[in-house]
Image: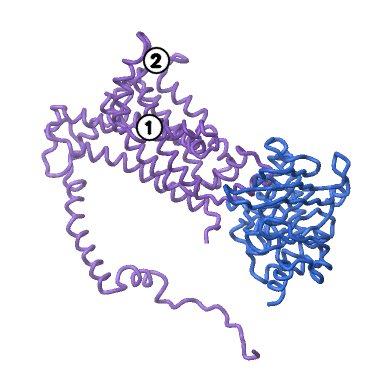
């Protein structure tokens, strides 16, 4: 016993840390690994130069019509010429400032919320869910304070995609929470109603929901009663996505140990208080990947409004491609649309990862 | 307000019992877990409940704050009868604190938030006051320096002490402990027992399911032995350990004491 002496902490061997350590561990740790590293490098060598050549070096960036694009590269002049259509749809050009103002407002309200140090996060958060949607709606639709009215038929392009997904995301989450709670409720009537709702909406494709909303629903409504096509599409999307959201959240609820419910009850917290402060924060945190997955799916599903005659960003690209002035140019438009979707989806994905890290409080061992 | 002052008072209907259980039965489906439980607990009394696993001891104390529902008989807590009435259940839960075997702290809240949540939202206490109370209780369980940490960053013993502080923040008149040291490493059991002994010495009414016989000998006014859903024997600790009446009790004691 007297021979025991505590050894001071020592740094790990230099070959296991830093750049050298990373390369050793990840690229050349075994002969197989080394082999795949070289295969990967070779593939990059094969693919990257032609892609860069098409997209940048041989591309045409300006021109009046299809005749300008004579090179072998991409015809970005087409995207440049039609960019307002892709972003604003058929929104009247003299009112673009209103849409721009909404975009600016969106950036101003949401970007600061991503920074921890920002002091008014809570107020910006409340505004983004309450004031912002209303102000945006009246700005875009007009017919108030002397702003000209713009029919929803003229809304389109990327702005329509964003409007549909914003409304879908903001509404589907609370509905999903309520449906998930309802499905786990002890009250048989509420539980049955929630199960029926969820299974009904989950059991049909979104495309048929939209089709029903746009074509069938007016047939069932009494004579003279109509309501807006965009609104009907929105309701369809929200119902559909909240059913999916409910099941994602239910997964989170089931992962919360019984002890959490018991501790909350033992402290005297009522059902709604324990859900609000104890259960939901933990359940939602657990299923952030699933929630964001649903959001991303929703964002991309908005393209389906095309079949009921609404033109989102993909729809406007398709309508521009048939223009005879730009004969033979189509890939560039689709690449642009894909890029728009990718930017937003990737942004959501990164944000969710940052959120997971931030909310991780070290209880998982 | 100290716990001592409130505990000596008698309950509203004039008798001096903190808890009265009369002819209580409970079933899980077909399984008869608790059979004819009769128990009276005076204000300020400290009771230790022991027995083999599956004997119904946890279920019994969990009936007292309605985490489990009894199907027959009567339970009165601070003179209020436990029924389906949600208002009465809430009223009783406000007066009865509970500590669990697995602590059940809220992992997404800091230690301080764990302690202030219920006072703020159930007792409607202003936040500053709730934090003050919480800090003084965290000091009492000797971990005020951990207030800003999350439960996952604490040791088991520290977590259980936070759980005790969290219950005390509601200023309960009765504390229930459901095997509070069973999930702890031997080195941490003592720090939790010290807090519990201190609490007992201050006159808190306590019902404690535990196998810590040293604790029972030191603080308990009465030891209850349960088996197969019934109270087999109850006595003061001195008589209970030195002169057990029933064979089942003798067997149990020989198994937990002589090893």
- Please provide percent x and percent y for residue A32: 25, 71
Instruction: Determine if marks 2 and 1 fall on one subunit.
Output: yes
Residue name at image x 79 percent, y 63 percent: B197
**Could you say which chain is coloured blue in the image?**
B
| Residue that sits furthest to the bottom in the current view | A3
Q: Is A200 rendered above or below residue B113?
A: above
In the image: residue A145, left or right of residue A259: left
Mark 1 crowdedness (10 Å alpha carbons): few <14, some 14-19, many ≥20: few
> What is the spatial separation of the Cα atoms under label 2 and label 1, in whole angstroms?
40 Å
Q: Which mark is residue A200?
A: 1
Q: If the image is split into quadrants, where does the C terminus of chain B sit?
A: bottom right
Badge count: 2
**Could you say which chain is coloured purple in the image?**
A
Contact (Cβ within 8 Å) of mark 2 with mark 1: no
In the image: residue B226, left or right of residue A197: right
Secondary structure at badge 2 equals loop
In the image: residue B79, left or right of residue A42: right
């Amino acid at each position: 016993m007297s021979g025991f002496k505590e050894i001071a902490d020592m740094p790990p061997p230099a070959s296991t840390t830093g750049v050298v350590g990373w390369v050793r561990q990840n690229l050349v740790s075994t002969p197989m690994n080394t082999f795949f590293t070289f295969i990967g490098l070779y593939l990059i060598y094969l693919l990257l130069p032609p892609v860069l050549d098409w997209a940048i070096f041989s591309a045409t960036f300006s021109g009046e019509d299809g005749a300008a694009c004579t090179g072998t590269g991409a015809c970005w002049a087409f995207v440049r010429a039609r960019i307002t259509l892709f972003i604003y749809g058929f929104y009247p050009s003299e009112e673009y400032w209103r849409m721009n103002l909404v975009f600016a407002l969106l950036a101003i309200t949401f970007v600061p919320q991503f920074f921890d140090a920002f002091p008014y996060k809570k107020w910006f958060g409340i505004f983004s869910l309450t004031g912002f949607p209303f102000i945006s709606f009246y700005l875009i639709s007009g017919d108030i304070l002397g702003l000209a009215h713009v029919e929803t038929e003229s809304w389109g392009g990327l702005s329509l995609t964003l409007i549909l997904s914003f409304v879908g995301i903001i509404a589907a989450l609370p509905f999903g929470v309520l449906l998930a709670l309802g499905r786990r409720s002890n009250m048989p009537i509420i539980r049955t109603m929630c199960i029926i709702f969820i299974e009904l909406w989950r059991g049909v494709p979104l495309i048929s929901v939209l089709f029903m909303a746009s074509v069938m629903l007016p047939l069932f409504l009494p004579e003279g009663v109509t309501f807006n096509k965009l609104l009907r599409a929105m309701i369809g999307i929200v119902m559909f996505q909240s059913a999916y959201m409910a099941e994602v959240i239910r997964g989170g609820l089931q992962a919360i140990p019984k002890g959490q419910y018991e501790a909350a009850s033992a402290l005297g917290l009522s059902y709604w208080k324990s859900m609000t402060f104890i259960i939901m924060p933990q359940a939602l945190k657990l299923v952030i990947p699933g929630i964001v997955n649903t959001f991303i799916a929703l964002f991309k599903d908005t393209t389906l409004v095309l079949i009921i005659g609404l033109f989102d960003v993909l729809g406007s690209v398709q309508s521009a491609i048939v223009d005879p002035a730009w004969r033979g140019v189509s890939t560039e438009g689709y690449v642009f649309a894909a890029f728009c979707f990718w930017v937003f989806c990737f942004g959501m994905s990164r944000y969710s990862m940052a959120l997971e890290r931030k909310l991780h409080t070290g209880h998982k061992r | 307000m100290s716990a001592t002052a409130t505990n000596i008072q008698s309950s509203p209907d004039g008798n001096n019992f903190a808890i009265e259980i009369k002819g209580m039965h409970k079933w899980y489906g077909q399984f008869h877990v608790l059979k004819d439980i009769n128990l009276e607990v005076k204000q300020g009394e400290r009771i230790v409940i022991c027995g083999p696993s599956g004997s119904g001891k946890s279920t019994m104390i969990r009936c007292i704050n309605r985490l489990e529902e009894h199907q027959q008989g009567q339970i009165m807590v601070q003179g209020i009868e436990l029924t389906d009435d949600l208002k009465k259940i809430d009223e009783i839960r406000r007066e009865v604190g509970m500590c669990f075997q697995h602590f059940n702290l809220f992992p997404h809240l800091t230690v301080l938030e764990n302690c202030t949540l219920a006072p703020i939202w159930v007792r409607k206490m202003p936040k500053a006051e709730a934090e003050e109370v919480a800090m003084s209780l965290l000091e009492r369980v000797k971990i005020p320096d951990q207030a800003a940490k999350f439960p996952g960053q604490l040791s088991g013993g520290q977590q259980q002490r936070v759980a005790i502080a969290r219950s005390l923040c509601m200023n309960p008149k009765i504390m229930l402990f459901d095997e509070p040291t069973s999930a702890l490493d031997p080195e941490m059991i003592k720090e939790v027992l010290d807090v519990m002994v201190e609490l007992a010495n201050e006159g808190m009414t306590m019902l404690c399911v535990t196998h810590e016989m040293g604790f029972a000998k030191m603080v308990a006014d009465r030891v209850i032995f349960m088996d197969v859903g019934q109270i087999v024997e109850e006595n003061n600790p001195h008589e209970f350990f030195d002169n057990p009446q029933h064979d089942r009790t003798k067997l149990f004691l020989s198994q937990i004491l002589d090893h």
